[in-house]
Image (cartoon, rainbow, N blue to C red):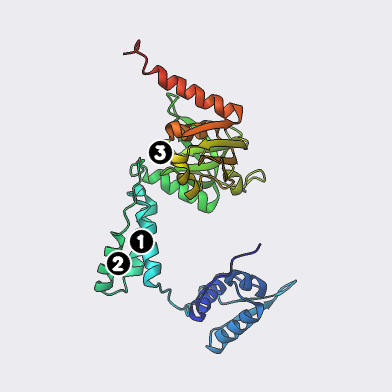
Amino acid sequence: MGRRAKQFSQAERLGIMMRALAARSWTINDLAQELGVTRRQVYRDLGHIEKEGHPLIHDEGADERTWRLPLGYKGLRPITLTPLELMSLYLARSHLAYLAGTPFVADLDGVFAKITSGLPQRTINHLERIGRCFLPLLRPLRRYDQQPEVLKILQKALLLQKTAVIRHQRPDRGREAEHRVDSYALRLYQNGLYLVAYSHTAAQHRSFAVERIRHAELTGDTFAVRDDFSPEKLDESFGVTEEEPQRIRIRIAREAAHFVRERQYHPTQTIEEAGNGDVIVAMRAGGVDEIASWILSWGEKAVALEPPALVEAVRRKLASALAQYSPKIR
């Protein structure tokens, strides 16, 4: 399908192009795709950059000519943001409140300090008021402010593709387990961070809850991402449990049907009208236990239809919960 066309003013487009050219060499086709414009427009923009006196360099590559500016070129236009772009940044910042006390928020605060350093105080006060317009309800919160060193190591492991050694404590085990891991990604799920990695110790891909990583240290080894891993594969799971995806069907009562019509719970989700106001939610996803817990969160308004393993998981959880209210237990 290709990239969606991007809407930039000429000044914005030229600024983006110059910063890209100062970072590495680009072909005309790559610039056209990156900026969502025609090749002819790219040539016009390059001509405009040269006309303004910037030292544009073109190299004859093996297949196609490339264009660049000198590495570290100081004549780049400053990055400016519109009030609406700043407002969107404040929205993003407000949704990271659960990461307070971590290197991520400290780095983000540094970005905001750079952005606001050249603004008049009146504008800064206005932006702070805008920031208070966003009130995210992030519950339950997980505590990461006691793990700054672990998070710094994970940042470096991800950015530098360095193998790390972590000590991870599962709640169902009394002692910590040591894993030698190649870190692929940090995944956000239900206001929690999970390290997606290949564990050499377990010889498989694993997701580690970051709040349970007690210690982390880098090794001197670099790694390449394994061929059997792809970020898209993570979307096959309903949550963080990695299982083979299978056909899931759930009936939602008409009293709650509007919720599932208005929300996307999984990338493969489809909705079928049942005729009496109920809807059938279907998807291909892995993680039967997580899906069963989600179904139970709907109470009597949701019924698992298939696969049989999901129906049995819901039935088992309901029976166990009901047993807690037995008169004999009281």
Residue 85 location (% of width, % of height): 40, 68
> Which numbered disc, 3 or 2, marks the residue closer to the eye?
2
Q: Which numbered dot is residue 127?
A: 2
Can you tell which mark lies on residue 90?
1
Earlier along the polypeptide chain: callout 3 or callout 2? 2
Q: Earlier in the sequence, mark 1 or mark 2?
A: 1
Disc 1 to disc 2, C-alpha distance: 8 Å
Q: Is residue 114 above or below residue 206?
A: below
Viewer-side label of 1, 3: 1
Task: Please state the total of marks drawn on the protein image.
Answer: 3
Proximity of marks 1 and 2: CB atoms separated by less than 8 Å:
yes
Q: Amino acid at mark 3?
A: Glu
Which image quarter holds the N terminus?
bottom right
Q: Which residue is mark 3?
A: 211
| Residue 253 shows up from this direction | yes
Q: Does residue 242 show up?
A: no
In front of the other: 320 or 9? 320
Kind of residue at disc 2 = Leu
Q: CA distance from mark 1 to mark 3?
A: 26 Å
